[in-house]
Each structure stands twice: as C-alpha cells, then as structure tokens.
Image (cartoon, helix red, strand yellow):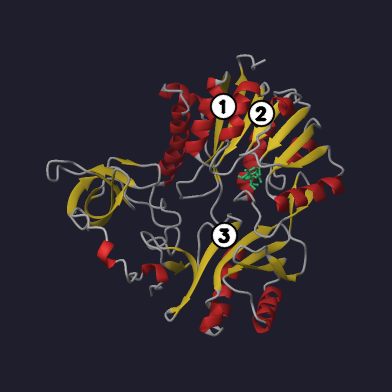
Amino acid sequence: MKNRSRNSRSRPGRRGNAPRRDPMVGKEVDVRIADIGARGDGLAETAAIDGKSLLVYVDNVLPGDEVRVKLRQKRGDGYGAEVISVKARPTPHADAKCPHYDQCGGCSLQHLPDADYRDWKRQRAVQAVMRAGISDRGEAENLVGGLETSPPASRRRADFSVISTQDGVFVGFAERFSHHIINVSGCAVLLPDIVEFRNHCQSFLESLPRETAAIVKSIVINAADNGLDVVIGASADPDLDLCQGLAELADYADLARMAWKTGDNPAEPLAQRRTPEIHFADIAVPVPAGGFLQATRQGEEALTRAIANALSHIPARQVIDLFCGIGSFTFPLALQGDRRRVLAVEGDANAVKALQYAVGRASAPIEVSRRDLFRQPLDADDLKNADVVLFDPPRAGALAQCEILADFGPEWILAVSCNPATFARDIRLLRNGGYELQKVVPVDQFLWSPHLEMFAVLRRTLPAAA
Ligand SMILES: C[S@@+](CC[C@H](N)C(=O)[O-])C[C@H]1O[C@@H](n2cnc3c(N)ncnc32)[C@H](O)[C@@H]1O
C-alpha cells in the first residue's frame, strides 16, 4: 500500500505556472547497457531520437543487458529510465538478498554477482585516484589495495523515516524513484536487533490514534556496545500517555536509551537504563543521542587497522586528528602501538563533551578542541609541531583545511573520506602542494549501495612553504 504524503499532492495556485511537460518523458526506447555509473545505475545511450542520442540511467541492470525502457525524469545530462521488458541478459543477475529489494531505494546493487560488485566498488576508488590527478590507470590501480567489505547484517545505524496515513503506519526507507516510505520488516544490511526494534515501533505506532502517531517523523537508531540508542524525531512534544507508552516500549526492548527530539530542539531522554557506550582501544566513550558512529564495527576496524599499518612505518610523536567525532581513531592513535600525543579537533559540541569525558576518565594523552574546521581551519602555527595529520571530514570534504595543509602540512597526512568526489578534489589539492599519494584502501561499509569510504596515505616530497 502506498503512503500519500503532502508532497505528492498538487499544490493549488501553482497550476498557471506549471512547467511544460518534457516531451521525452514517457517515451519507450531499446538500449544496451554499457556500464554501471557512479550512483549504481546502468548507463546506456539511445539510438538517435529527433536527431540526438540520449544518455539514460537504468536501475537494476548489468552491463550487456538489452532492455526496453521508459524515460522517466530528466537527470543531469540524461534521463532516468525504467525497464519495461528484458530482451537479453548475457550475465545472470544475482538473487536479491533482501525481501524488499524490488521496492526499496536503499541498496540497489544486490543483483550484481559478488565478484563484479567487489570489482565495481574497488574501481570507484581507482577512478577517484585518477580524478585526483593520477591519470595513468596502471599507476592508479597499483595504489589502490583490495576492498575491505563489511558482512551482511552488520550496519549499526539506521535512519528510518516515519509516516502515518489513513493507509497505515510506514517506518522505513524511501521507495525507488519516489518519496513513498516502505515498511522494511526485514533488512539484509542492518543488525538484526535494529530491524526487530523497528518492527516493535511499527506495531506500537499502529496501536496509537492516528493523529498521535502522525507527529512521529523519524526514528534514528544507533547500536551502542551495551544496547540500542534510539532518537524519535517528531513535529510536536509527546503527551504524558505517549511518554508512558514509549517508556514501556523502551523497557520491553531493553533499550540503553530512548530520546525524543521535537523539530530542531535538542534530544531529551525519555527512558534510560544505561548510558549508551562504545569502546575504542578498550576505552568506553558515551555516545551522544543520534551521534556519528562509523557505519559498521568491521568498517571501523578496517580503517583503524589501515591507520595502524601506516603509522607502523612513521615515527610519530604528535598527531592531529581532525573531524575526530567521539574518538573512533583518537584513542587507537594515542594508546595503541607507540604512545603518541594527540590533538583531537571536532565541531560538534555533544561529540566534544563525550570525548572530553572519556579522555578524562582514561587519563589518555589527548587534548580535545572544539572548532569549526570549515570556517576556521588549523593554520601554519597550529600545525607546526605535528608529525602526522589525520582527517575524516563529512561528505563535503576538507577543502579549507586542505588548502592550508597543502602549504604548511607536516611530512605525513592520513586521509579518510566517505565521498570519492570530495576525496579526489582534496587529494588533488594536496598533491599540487607537494604531497605524493602512496596508498589507498577502499572500505565498503554500505554493502550493495554506491557509497564507499577510502583511506589514503600521503607523504610530503616537496618542502612546505616557509
Ligand atoms: C565522518 S565523521 C568522522 C568522525 C570520526 N572521525 C569517527 O570516525 O567517528 C565527520 C565528523 O566531522 C564533524 N564535523 C562536521 N562538520 C565539521 C566542521 N565544520 N568542523 C569540525 N567538525 C565537523 C562531524 O560532527 C563528525 O563528527
């Protein structure tokens, strides 16, 4: 059953200005899939239509597939398109691992045979290295190591959207090609505890009057080491009955904590049995409500291992950990292998507070600083005593900081990135400043999706600016 959201209704008063319908939308064409693009869709070129061939992006296909497609919506320089019929599939598609695969917009690459999937992901890293300026494919291939993949059922964070309509309650992810939310009562990538709690939430919301359930808009779940940490996002505050019902649900599911967040207000705890904690290098760190965690424990371990391997060749006493969050890498940097002094820098107040608390309890050689690294990156003076800088920015990358590192960075830089596009831009900047890219490790924490994390080692080969 579809959920009808306000977004999908036509808006009165705008009809007179409605844009003209694109005459290409709805056309049916035959295509042969040439490749899988960066967002995971099949890429194909149509035969000439009105004298011009078009690029189409097709979901759920493999290179070599011959399919008839219907053009849906304009997308960049081409059109998104939907398969109407299949003429040939020279490579058999892999069986879907998830019951919602046909509908869910989440992990769209389950139909790739495993070896092809792994190769496609690794090639995303090779392409990013080439976009960073290493144009020789052989050289780029040599720099990129094997893909580190997380297993199914290991994702420890879920951001579910929630919508309650006359057709029912929907707690899940957006459907492919639409804003409709589908119920994901089973999920091949999430930890089973998260899926089970999602199912409890749906039943609970279905038991409420519709206008009460309708204030709930999202459910964010982090799996801490000692239980689930849940934040319910809503458009209004809960009344006493709802608070009571939710506290009972939290108790029944043995959650570590449940919090409520109205609009942009801070999350307020509704029920807490234990402070949610996560361990880095055996140090327990309290997890802020809805705070950032690496998506899987295995992914975090792969990145930590890659950092440790790099540092085993680098004599480093002073390390700067930029965009450090609650310290996934900070504690291993300070406490594993050679002990090092670490300056850990982060913009989010809750993350800084949690990290400071854990550093104090562990008496670790770590100084924590809160700073907006987009507006106020570390300058030459801040960087002068560092042997190594590690950075792990959000998807936007670390442009402002890399501009300064290119001129004044230390001998070694370790870069972690969750976005191949900004990774390429930032690494290019550093290379132009005199760094050599020595190694890249691709880390797959988002199984069967186009997302990819990368770790890179860079060494200065030209002197820093005076
Ligand atoms: C990809 S996470 C990495 C966190 C940490 N390294 C880890 O592995 O857990 C990016 C971090 O950058 C922080 N961040 C985002 N924008 C920032 C900014 N402008 N200045 C400083 N930190 C920022 C986020 O709060 C988040 O903790």
Above or below, 383 against 46 in this view is above
- Secondary structure, mark 2, is helix
Residue at x 85% of width, y 47% of height: 360
Instruction: Give how far apart the Cα atoms at labels 1 and 3 are.
Output: 31 Å
The residue indicated by pointer 1 is 439
105 sits to left or right of 333: left
Of the residues shown, which amino acid type is indicated by label 2?
Answer: Ala
- Can you tell me whether the CB of the residue at mark 3 lies under 8 Å from the nearest atom of ligand 1? no
Mark nearer the N terminus (3 vs 2): 3
Classify 10 Å Cα crowding around label 1: few (below 14), some (14-19), many (20 and above): some
389 sits to left or right of 65: right
Ligand 1 found in image quarter: top right
Above or below, 427 against 73 in this view is above
Residue 260: image location, x then y, percent = 65, 69
**Circles 2 and 1 in contact, beta carbons < 8 Å:** yes
Q: Which mark is residue 310?
A: 2
Of the residues shown, which amino acid type is indicated by label 1?
Answer: Lys
The residue indicated by pointer 3 is 158
Say whether residue 169 is visible. no
Instruction: Give how far apart the Cα atoms at labels 2 and 1 are.
Output: 9 Å
Counting the numbered discs, the total is: 3
Residue at x 58% of width, y 44% of height: 394
- Secondary structure, mark 3, is strand
Viewer-proximal residue among 344 and 90? 344
Residue at x 56% of width, y 83% of height: 208
Residue at x 55% of width, y 50% of height: 151
Of the residues shown, which amino acid type is indicated by label 3?
Answer: Ala
